[in-house]
Image: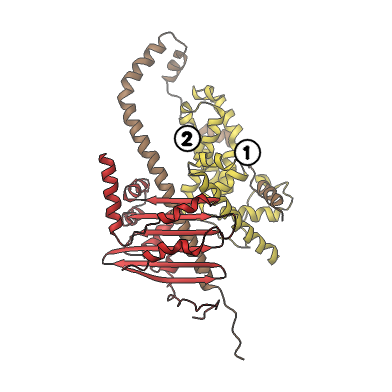
Chain colours: A yellow, B brown, C red
Amino acid sequence: MVRAAASGDRDAFAALVRQNQSLVFGLAWNSLRNIAIAEELAQDVFLELYSALPDLESNAHVVNWLRRVTLHRCIDHVRRERNRPKVGLDEIAEPMAAENGSEGDADPFLSQRVRVLTASLPPRARAVLLLRYQEELDPPEIAEVLRIPVNTVKSQLHRSLALLRSKLQRTRVAT
Amino acid sequence: MTEREEEDLLRESLRRVQPPDGFADRVMARLPRQPWWSRILLPARRAAWAPALAILLVAFLGAGSWEYAQWRDRRLRAERAHEELVQALEITTEKVQETKARLFRPRPMRGIL
Amino acid sequence: MKYEIFAIATLITLACFGQQLDLSSLDKLAAKAKGSTVISLDPDKLALASSLVDDKDSKKLMNGIKGISVRSFEFAEKGAFSRGDLDPIRKQLTGAGWSRAISVKENDEDVEIYFYKSGTSGGLAIVSAEPKELTVVNIIGPADLSSLGKLSGLAGLDGVQGLIGGGSRKAPPAPAAPKSGSKDDEE
Protein backbone atom coordinates (compact mmCIF):
# COMPACT_ATOMS: atom_id res chain seq x y z
CA MET A 1 0.00 0.00 0.00
CA VAL A 2 2.90 2.35 0.79
CA ARG A 3 4.49 1.80 -2.62
CA ALA A 4 1.21 2.22 -4.42
CA ALA A 5 0.54 5.46 -2.59
CA ALA A 6 4.11 6.64 -3.30
CA SER A 7 3.62 6.08 -7.01
CA GLY A 8 0.55 8.31 -7.06
CA ASP A 9 -2.28 5.91 -6.35
CA ARG A 10 -4.67 8.19 -4.51
CA ASP A 11 -6.94 5.40 -3.32
CA ALA A 12 -3.93 3.77 -1.70
CA PHE A 13 -3.02 7.06 -0.04
CA ALA A 14 -6.59 7.51 1.23
CA ALA A 15 -6.40 4.02 2.74
CA LEU A 16 -3.11 4.99 4.43
CA VAL A 17 -4.79 8.05 5.89
CA ARG A 18 -7.71 6.04 7.26
CA GLN A 19 -5.36 3.44 8.67
CA ASN A 20 -3.29 6.00 10.57
CA GLN A 21 -5.66 8.84 11.30
CA SER A 22 -6.36 7.82 14.89
CA LEU A 23 -2.61 7.69 15.59
CA VAL A 24 -1.97 11.18 14.22
CA PHE A 25 -5.11 12.84 15.48
CA GLY A 26 -4.75 11.08 18.83
CA LEU A 27 -1.23 12.44 19.35
CA ALA A 28 -2.33 15.93 18.29
CA TRP A 29 -5.46 15.91 20.41
CA ASN A 30 -3.76 14.49 23.50
CA SER A 31 -0.99 17.09 23.10
CA LEU A 32 -2.97 20.18 22.29
CA ARG A 33 -6.49 19.58 23.68
CA ASN A 34 -8.09 21.66 20.95
CA ILE A 35 -10.08 19.80 18.31
CA ALA A 36 -9.77 22.40 15.57
CA ILE A 37 -6.03 22.81 15.98
CA ALA A 38 -5.52 19.06 16.34
CA GLU A 39 -7.44 18.40 13.11
CA GLU A 40 -5.58 21.09 11.19
CA LEU A 41 -2.26 19.80 12.44
CA ALA A 42 -3.22 16.22 11.60
CA GLN A 43 -4.26 17.21 8.09
CA ASP A 44 -0.95 19.05 7.60
CA VAL A 45 0.95 15.96 8.71
CA PHE A 46 -0.76 13.82 6.10
CA LEU A 47 -0.14 16.42 3.42
CA GLU A 48 3.53 16.33 4.34
CA LEU A 49 3.40 12.52 4.27
CA TYR A 50 2.15 12.68 0.70
CA SER A 51 5.38 14.46 -0.34
CA ALA A 52 7.61 12.30 1.82
CA LEU A 53 6.23 8.92 0.70
CA PRO A 54 8.90 8.26 -1.94
CA ASP A 55 11.50 8.20 0.87
CA LEU A 56 9.57 5.69 2.98
CA GLU A 57 9.88 1.99 2.34
CA SER A 58 7.38 0.20 4.52
CA ASN A 59 4.38 0.60 6.72
CA ALA A 60 6.59 0.56 9.80
CA HIS A 61 8.60 3.47 8.37
CA VAL A 62 5.40 5.36 7.69
CA VAL A 63 4.13 4.84 11.23
CA ASN A 64 7.42 5.98 12.81
CA TRP A 65 7.57 8.93 10.45
CA LEU A 66 4.02 9.94 11.39
CA ARG A 67 4.78 9.72 15.09
CA ARG A 68 7.93 11.81 14.74
CA VAL A 69 6.50 14.50 12.52
CA THR A 70 3.23 14.81 14.44
CA LEU A 71 4.98 15.24 17.75
CA HIS A 72 7.53 17.69 16.40
CA ARG A 73 4.71 19.75 14.96
CA CYS A 74 2.91 19.65 18.30
CA ILE A 75 6.09 20.69 20.11
CA ASP A 76 6.65 23.54 17.63
CA HIS A 77 3.04 24.63 17.96
CA VAL A 78 3.24 24.80 21.74
CA ARG A 79 6.48 26.73 21.66
CA ARG A 80 5.06 29.17 19.14
CA GLU A 81 1.80 29.67 20.94
CA ARG A 82 3.26 29.40 24.48
CA ASN A 83 -0.14 28.17 25.32
CA ARG A 84 0.30 25.47 27.90
CA PRO A 85 -3.04 24.80 29.60
CA LYS A 86 -2.94 25.74 33.23
CA VAL A 87 -3.36 22.89 35.64
CA GLY A 88 -6.34 23.38 37.86
CA LEU A 89 -9.63 21.93 38.90
CA ASP A 90 -11.51 24.08 36.40
CA GLU A 91 -11.35 21.81 33.39
CA ILE A 92 -11.00 22.87 29.81
CA ALA A 93 -14.30 22.13 28.10
CA GLU A 94 -14.07 19.16 25.77
CA PRO A 95 -16.31 19.65 22.78
CA MET A 96 -17.50 16.42 21.24
CA ALA A 97 -16.00 14.61 24.21
CA ALA A 98 -18.15 11.56 23.61
CA GLU A 99 -16.91 11.26 20.03
CA ASN A 100 -13.31 11.91 20.95
CA GLY A 101 -12.17 9.10 23.09
CA SER A 102 -13.73 9.48 26.51
CA GLU A 103 -16.52 6.97 26.01
CA GLY A 104 -15.70 3.73 27.72
CA ASP A 105 -13.45 5.33 30.39
CA ALA A 106 -13.83 3.49 33.68
CA ASP A 107 -13.61 6.83 35.53
CA PRO A 108 -14.25 9.62 33.03
CA PHE A 109 -13.39 12.37 35.51
CA LEU A 110 -10.05 10.83 36.39
CA SER A 111 -9.24 10.12 32.75
CA GLN A 112 -10.02 13.70 31.83
CA ARG A 113 -7.73 14.90 34.63
CA VAL A 114 -4.96 12.71 33.27
CA ARG A 115 -5.44 14.15 29.78
CA VAL A 116 -5.46 17.74 30.99
CA LEU A 117 -2.41 17.18 33.17
CA THR A 118 -0.58 15.47 30.32
CA ALA A 119 -1.28 18.40 28.05
CA SER A 120 0.17 20.73 30.67
CA LEU A 121 3.55 18.99 30.73
CA PRO A 122 6.50 20.59 28.95
CA PRO A 123 6.21 19.82 25.24
CA ARG A 124 8.89 17.21 25.02
CA ALA A 125 7.94 15.44 28.23
CA ARG A 126 4.40 15.32 26.86
CA ALA A 127 5.65 13.73 23.64
CA VAL A 128 7.55 11.05 25.56
CA LEU A 129 4.52 10.22 27.70
CA LEU A 130 2.24 9.95 24.68
CA LEU A 131 4.61 7.67 22.84
CA ARG A 132 4.77 5.48 25.94
CA TYR A 133 1.07 5.28 26.72
CA GLN A 134 -0.77 6.06 23.51
CA GLU A 135 1.62 4.25 21.20
CA GLU A 136 2.93 1.79 23.82
CA LEU A 137 6.54 2.16 22.76
CA ASP A 138 9.52 1.15 24.88
CA PRO A 139 12.10 3.76 25.88
CA PRO A 140 14.56 2.72 23.12
CA GLU A 141 11.79 2.99 20.53
CA ILE A 142 10.76 6.39 21.90
CA ALA A 143 14.40 7.52 21.76
CA GLU A 144 14.55 6.48 18.11
CA VAL A 145 11.37 8.31 17.18
CA LEU A 146 12.31 11.54 18.92
CA ARG A 147 16.05 11.18 18.19
CA ILE A 148 17.07 11.75 21.79
CA PRO A 149 19.16 9.57 24.13
CA VAL A 150 17.44 6.66 25.87
CA ASN A 151 18.50 7.97 29.27
CA THR A 152 16.76 11.24 28.49
CA VAL A 153 13.58 9.32 27.70
CA LYS A 154 13.78 7.40 30.95
CA SER A 155 14.39 10.48 33.06
CA GLN A 156 11.61 12.40 31.26
CA LEU A 157 9.20 9.53 31.95
CA HIS A 158 10.25 9.32 35.55
CA ARG A 159 9.78 13.06 36.12
CA SER A 160 6.47 13.21 34.28
CA LEU A 161 4.99 10.26 36.13
CA ALA A 162 6.09 11.69 39.48
CA LEU A 163 4.47 15.01 38.60
CA LEU A 164 1.23 13.44 37.39
CA ARG A 165 1.11 11.23 40.43
CA SER A 166 1.44 14.14 42.85
CA LYS A 167 -1.13 16.28 41.03
CA LEU A 168 -3.61 13.40 40.78
CA GLN A 169 -3.08 12.72 44.46
CA ARG A 170 -4.01 16.34 45.23
CA THR A 171 -7.12 15.96 43.10
CA ARG A 172 -8.23 12.92 45.06
CA VAL A 173 -7.60 14.71 48.37
CA ALA A 174 -9.50 17.79 47.18
CA THR A 175 -12.50 15.79 46.01
CA MET B 1 -3.10 3.11 43.27
CA THR B 2 -0.69 0.34 42.29
CA GLU B 3 1.83 0.83 39.52
CA ARG B 4 -0.18 -1.50 37.31
CA GLU B 5 -3.38 0.48 37.91
CA GLU B 6 -1.50 3.67 37.16
CA GLU B 7 -0.21 2.28 33.86
CA ASP B 8 -3.71 1.09 32.93
CA LEU B 9 -5.16 4.51 33.73
CA LEU B 10 -2.60 6.25 31.57
CA ARG B 11 -3.14 3.84 28.66
CA GLU B 12 -6.89 4.23 28.88
CA SER B 13 -6.80 8.01 29.20
CA LEU B 14 -4.24 8.59 26.46
CA ARG B 15 -5.36 6.04 23.89
CA ARG B 16 -5.64 6.86 20.19
CA VAL B 17 -8.61 8.99 19.20
CA GLN B 18 -10.54 9.02 15.94
CA PRO B 19 -10.81 12.44 14.30
CA PRO B 20 -14.19 13.92 13.43
CA ASP B 21 -16.06 12.17 10.59
CA GLY B 22 -14.87 12.89 7.07
CA PHE B 23 -11.28 13.55 8.08
CA ALA B 24 -9.75 11.43 5.32
CA ASP B 25 -11.95 13.13 2.71
CA ARG B 26 -10.82 16.55 3.91
CA VAL B 27 -7.18 15.48 3.63
CA MET B 28 -7.70 14.14 0.12
CA ALA B 29 -9.42 17.36 -0.91
CA ARG B 30 -6.28 19.28 0.06
CA LEU B 31 -3.87 17.12 -1.91
CA PRO B 32 -2.17 18.90 -4.80
CA ARG B 33 -3.56 18.11 -8.21
CA GLN B 34 -1.58 15.46 -10.03
CA PRO B 35 0.69 17.13 -12.59
CA TRP B 36 0.06 16.14 -16.24
CA TRP B 37 3.50 14.58 -16.62
CA SER B 38 2.84 12.09 -13.83
CA ARG B 39 0.35 10.39 -16.11
CA ILE B 40 3.19 9.81 -18.56
CA LEU B 41 6.05 9.09 -16.19
CA LEU B 42 4.19 6.78 -13.85
CA PRO B 43 3.34 4.28 -16.59
CA ALA B 44 6.91 4.79 -17.85
CA ARG B 45 8.18 3.05 -14.74
CA ARG B 46 7.25 -0.12 -16.49
CA ALA B 47 8.82 0.90 -19.84
CA ALA B 48 12.11 -0.53 -21.08
CA TRP B 49 13.79 2.86 -21.44
CA ALA B 50 13.00 3.91 -17.87
CA PRO B 51 16.14 2.42 -16.26
CA ALA B 52 18.42 4.22 -18.78
CA LEU B 53 16.65 7.49 -18.11
CA ALA B 54 16.94 6.89 -14.39
CA ILE B 55 20.72 6.36 -14.66
CA LEU B 56 21.11 9.59 -16.64
CA LEU B 57 19.09 11.50 -14.08
CA VAL B 58 21.10 10.04 -11.20
CA ALA B 59 24.38 11.05 -12.85
CA PHE B 60 23.04 14.53 -13.47
CA LEU B 61 21.78 14.89 -9.93
CA GLY B 62 24.91 13.33 -8.37
CA ALA B 63 26.62 16.61 -7.65
CA GLY B 64 23.46 18.10 -6.22
CA SER B 65 22.88 15.12 -3.97
CA TRP B 66 26.30 15.54 -2.31
CA GLU B 67 25.40 19.09 -1.37
CA TYR B 68 22.03 17.88 -0.18
CA ALA B 69 23.76 15.25 1.99
CA GLN B 70 25.93 17.99 3.50
CA TRP B 71 22.88 20.14 4.16
CA ARG B 72 21.01 17.24 5.65
CA ASP B 73 23.91 16.34 7.93
CA ARG B 74 24.12 19.92 9.19
CA ARG B 75 20.36 19.98 9.65
CA LEU B 76 20.45 16.79 11.75
CA ARG B 77 23.24 18.20 13.92
CA ALA B 78 21.30 21.43 14.34
CA GLU B 79 18.17 19.51 15.37
CA ARG B 80 20.14 17.54 17.95
CA ALA B 81 21.73 20.70 19.32
CA HIS B 82 18.31 22.35 19.46
CA GLU B 83 16.86 19.39 21.36
CA GLU B 84 19.71 19.55 23.87
CA LEU B 85 19.24 23.27 24.29
CA VAL B 86 15.56 22.86 24.99
CA GLN B 87 16.22 20.04 27.41
CA ALA B 88 18.81 22.14 29.27
CA LEU B 89 16.33 25.01 29.55
CA GLU B 90 13.60 22.63 30.70
CA ILE B 91 15.81 21.27 33.48
CA THR B 92 16.88 24.79 34.49
CA THR B 93 13.29 26.01 34.60
CA GLU B 94 12.19 22.96 36.55
CA LYS B 95 14.82 23.53 39.22
CA VAL B 96 14.06 27.23 39.47
CA GLN B 97 10.34 26.56 39.74
CA GLU B 98 10.94 24.03 42.50
CA THR B 99 13.04 26.59 44.32
CA LYS B 100 10.33 29.22 43.90
CA ALA B 101 7.74 26.82 45.27
CA ARG B 102 9.84 26.18 48.33
CA LEU B 103 10.65 29.83 48.91
CA PHE B 104 7.09 31.03 48.57
CA ARG B 105 5.42 28.14 50.36
CA PRO B 106 3.32 29.54 53.21
CA ARG B 107 5.02 28.90 56.51
CA PRO B 108 3.09 28.05 59.67
CA MET B 109 2.88 31.00 62.02
CA ARG B 110 5.14 30.62 65.03
CA GLY B 111 3.32 30.99 68.32
CA ILE B 112 4.09 34.07 70.32
CA LEU B 113 3.80 32.24 73.61
CA MET C 1 44.51 17.30 13.50
CA LYS C 2 43.47 20.85 12.73
CA TYR C 3 40.07 20.17 14.20
CA GLU C 4 41.60 18.77 17.39
CA ILE C 5 43.77 21.83 17.87
CA PHE C 6 40.76 24.05 17.30
CA ALA C 7 38.67 22.05 19.78
CA ILE C 8 41.36 22.20 22.46
CA ALA C 9 41.87 25.92 21.90
CA THR C 10 38.15 26.46 22.24
CA LEU C 11 38.06 24.52 25.51
CA ILE C 12 41.03 26.41 26.93
CA THR C 13 39.51 29.72 25.90
CA LEU C 14 36.26 28.78 27.56
CA ALA C 15 38.06 27.56 30.68
CA CYS C 16 39.69 30.97 30.99
CA PHE C 17 36.27 32.44 31.53
CA GLY C 18 35.49 32.25 35.22
CA GLN C 19 31.83 31.61 34.60
CA GLN C 20 32.56 28.28 32.91
CA LEU C 21 32.48 25.46 35.45
CA ASP C 22 34.30 22.18 35.00
CA LEU C 23 31.65 19.54 35.69
CA SER C 24 33.74 16.55 34.64
CA SER C 25 34.25 15.44 38.25
CA LEU C 26 30.57 14.42 38.26
CA ASP C 27 30.82 12.18 35.20
CA LYS C 28 31.82 9.16 37.29
CA LEU C 29 28.32 9.21 38.82
CA ALA C 30 26.79 8.20 35.50
CA ALA C 31 27.92 4.62 36.07
CA LYS C 32 25.87 4.44 39.29
CA ALA C 33 22.82 6.29 37.96
CA LYS C 34 19.70 4.66 36.57
CA GLY C 35 19.20 7.71 34.38
CA SER C 36 21.57 10.47 33.42
CA THR C 37 21.45 13.61 31.33
CA VAL C 38 24.74 15.05 30.14
CA ILE C 39 24.59 18.15 27.98
CA SER C 40 27.53 20.24 26.83
CA LEU C 41 26.65 22.99 24.39
CA ASP C 42 29.60 25.03 23.20
CA PRO C 43 29.27 28.17 21.05
CA ASP C 44 29.31 26.12 17.81
CA LYS C 45 26.48 23.84 18.90
CA LEU C 46 24.53 26.83 20.17
CA ALA C 47 24.96 28.50 16.80
CA LEU C 48 23.62 25.35 15.11
CA ALA C 49 20.65 25.27 17.48
CA SER C 50 20.04 28.97 16.86
CA SER C 51 19.83 28.34 13.11
CA LEU C 52 16.53 26.54 13.73
CA VAL C 53 15.03 29.37 15.74
CA ASP C 54 12.77 31.65 13.71
CA ASP C 55 11.89 34.23 16.30
CA LYS C 56 14.26 37.22 16.02
CA ASP C 57 14.14 38.11 19.70
CA SER C 58 14.93 34.55 20.75
CA LYS C 59 17.77 34.41 18.23
CA LYS C 60 19.20 37.62 19.68
CA LEU C 61 18.96 36.23 23.19
CA MET C 62 20.66 33.03 22.12
CA ASN C 63 23.55 35.00 20.68
CA GLY C 64 24.26 36.16 24.22
CA ILE C 65 24.68 32.62 25.52
CA LYS C 66 28.19 31.24 25.16
CA GLY C 67 27.76 27.80 26.67
CA ILE C 68 25.42 25.53 28.60
CA SER C 69 26.39 22.45 30.61
CA VAL C 70 24.07 20.12 32.46
CA ARG C 71 24.77 17.06 34.55
CA SER C 72 21.67 15.42 35.96
CA PHE C 73 21.70 11.98 37.54
CA GLU C 74 18.88 9.93 38.99
CA PHE C 75 19.67 7.03 41.26
CA ALA C 76 17.68 3.98 42.24
CA GLU C 77 18.69 4.20 45.90
CA LYS C 78 19.61 6.88 48.40
CA GLY C 79 23.26 7.17 49.29
CA ALA C 80 24.53 6.61 45.75
CA PHE C 81 26.38 9.90 45.94
CA SER C 82 27.71 12.00 48.78
CA ARG C 83 27.69 15.73 49.35
CA GLY C 84 31.46 15.50 48.98
CA ASP C 85 30.99 14.73 45.28
CA LEU C 86 29.86 18.33 44.90
CA ASP C 87 32.94 19.80 46.61
CA PRO C 88 34.91 20.33 43.36
CA ILE C 89 31.92 22.22 41.95
CA ARG C 90 31.33 24.32 45.07
CA LYS C 91 35.04 25.17 45.20
CA GLN C 92 34.80 26.68 41.73
CA LEU C 93 31.76 28.64 42.85
CA THR C 94 33.82 30.40 45.52
CA GLY C 95 35.96 31.91 42.75
CA ALA C 96 36.03 35.59 41.81
CA GLY C 97 32.81 36.85 40.27
CA TRP C 98 30.55 34.17 41.71
CA SER C 99 28.01 34.92 44.42
CA ARG C 100 25.39 32.67 45.91
CA ALA C 101 22.01 34.31 45.50
CA ILE C 102 19.66 31.66 46.81
CA SER C 103 20.04 28.70 49.10
CA VAL C 104 17.11 26.55 50.10
CA LYS C 105 17.57 23.57 52.37
CA GLU C 106 14.56 21.46 53.20
CA ASN C 107 14.71 18.00 54.72
CA ASP C 108 17.29 16.18 52.60
CA GLU C 109 16.98 18.52 49.64
CA ASP C 110 19.32 21.40 48.86
CA VAL C 111 19.12 23.87 46.03
CA GLU C 112 21.59 26.69 45.50
CA ILE C 113 21.54 29.26 42.74
CA TYR C 114 24.70 31.24 41.98
CA PHE C 115 25.24 34.19 39.68
CA TYR C 116 28.44 35.23 38.01
CA LYS C 117 29.16 38.83 37.16
CA SER C 118 32.44 40.29 35.96
CA GLY C 119 32.46 43.27 33.65
CA THR C 120 30.09 42.41 30.84
CA SER C 121 30.33 38.67 31.43
CA GLY C 122 27.56 36.83 33.19
CA GLY C 123 26.70 33.33 34.19
CA LEU C 124 24.42 31.16 36.24
CA ALA C 125 24.87 27.95 38.17
CA ILE C 126 22.29 25.77 39.87
CA VAL C 127 23.31 23.01 42.24
CA SER C 128 20.48 20.74 43.33
CA ALA C 129 20.92 17.70 45.56
CA GLU C 130 18.08 15.39 46.54
CA PRO C 131 18.36 11.93 48.08
CA LYS C 132 18.04 10.21 44.71
CA GLU C 133 18.85 12.99 42.27
CA LEU C 134 21.74 15.31 41.62
CA THR C 135 21.59 18.15 39.10
CA VAL C 136 24.09 20.83 38.21
CA VAL C 137 23.42 23.45 35.55
CA ASN C 138 25.93 26.03 34.31
CA ILE C 139 24.99 28.71 31.81
CA ILE C 140 27.61 31.13 30.47
CA GLY C 141 26.11 34.49 29.59
CA PRO C 142 23.98 36.38 29.00
CA ALA C 143 25.38 39.36 30.86
CA ASP C 144 21.80 40.42 31.46
CA LEU C 145 20.46 37.50 33.49
CA SER C 146 16.83 38.42 33.02
CA SER C 147 17.33 37.29 29.43
CA LEU C 148 17.49 33.75 30.72
CA GLY C 149 13.93 34.12 31.85
CA LYS C 150 12.87 35.23 28.39
CA LEU C 151 14.81 32.43 26.76
CA SER C 152 12.99 29.75 28.70
CA GLY C 153 10.00 30.78 26.60
CA LEU C 154 11.87 29.02 23.81
CA ALA C 155 11.07 25.78 25.59
CA GLY C 156 7.41 26.73 25.88
CA LEU C 157 7.65 26.94 29.65
CA ASP C 158 6.88 29.50 32.26
CA GLY C 159 9.82 31.83 32.56
CA VAL C 160 12.31 32.05 35.36
CA GLN C 161 11.76 35.78 35.36
CA GLY C 162 9.93 35.81 38.66
CA LEU C 163 12.92 34.42 40.44
CA ILE C 164 15.87 35.88 38.60
CA GLY C 165 14.31 39.26 37.91
CA GLY C 166 13.54 41.31 34.85
CA GLY C 167 10.00 39.96 34.59
CA SER C 168 6.66 41.28 35.60
CA ARG C 169 7.01 39.98 39.14
CA LYS C 170 9.82 41.34 41.25
CA ALA C 171 12.05 38.68 42.70
CA PRO C 172 12.18 38.72 46.47
CA PRO C 173 15.50 39.53 48.12
CA ALA C 174 17.59 36.40 48.48
CA PRO C 175 16.93 34.86 51.87
CA ALA C 176 19.80 34.45 54.26
CA ALA C 177 21.13 30.92 54.42
CA PRO C 178 19.21 29.12 57.18
CA LYS C 179 20.99 28.44 60.42
CA SER C 180 21.85 24.79 60.84
CA GLY C 181 19.07 22.83 62.46
CA SER C 182 16.27 25.23 61.58
CA LYS C 183 13.94 24.29 58.77
CA ASP C 184 12.14 27.52 58.17
CA ASP C 185 13.20 31.11 58.09
CA GLU C 186 10.82 34.01 58.17
CA GLU C 187 11.67 36.82 55.75
Residue C69 visible in the picture: yes
Q: Is residue C9 left or right of residue B46?
A: left
In three-dimensional space, the C-alpha distance between marks 1 and 2, rounded to whole angstroms, equals 21 Å
Which residue position is annotated with label 1?
Answer: B21
* Direction bottom: furthest residue: B113
Q: How many marks?
A: 2
Q: Is residue A109 left or right of residue C135?
A: right
Q: Is residue C125 left or right of residue A25?
A: left
Amino acid under label 2? Answer: Glu
For the N terminus of chain A, give its image quadrant.
Answer: top right
Quarter the C terminus of chain A occupies: bottom right
Residue A153 lies, in percent from the top left, at 53, 47
Tell me which residue sits at (48%, 44%) in the image.
A148
Mark 1 vs mark 2: give the one in front. Answer: 2
Q: Give neighbour class at mark 1: few <14, some 14-19, many 20+ (Cα, 10 Å).
A: few
In percent of the image, x 27 and y 39: which residue is there? C1
Name the one closer to the observer, B70 or B17.
B70
Q: Tag 1, which chain?
A: B
Q: Are marks 1 and 2 in contact (CB under 8 Å)?
A: no
The answer for which chain carries disc 2 is A
Q: Could you tell me the amino acid type at mark 1?
A: Asp
Q: Position of residue B47 (x, y in %)?
A: 44, 10
Location of residue C142 (image quadrant): bottom left
Query: Which element is circle 1 on?
Result: loop
Label 2, secondary structure: give it.
helix
Q: Image quadrant of residue A17?
A: top right
What residue sits right under mark 2 in the picture? A48
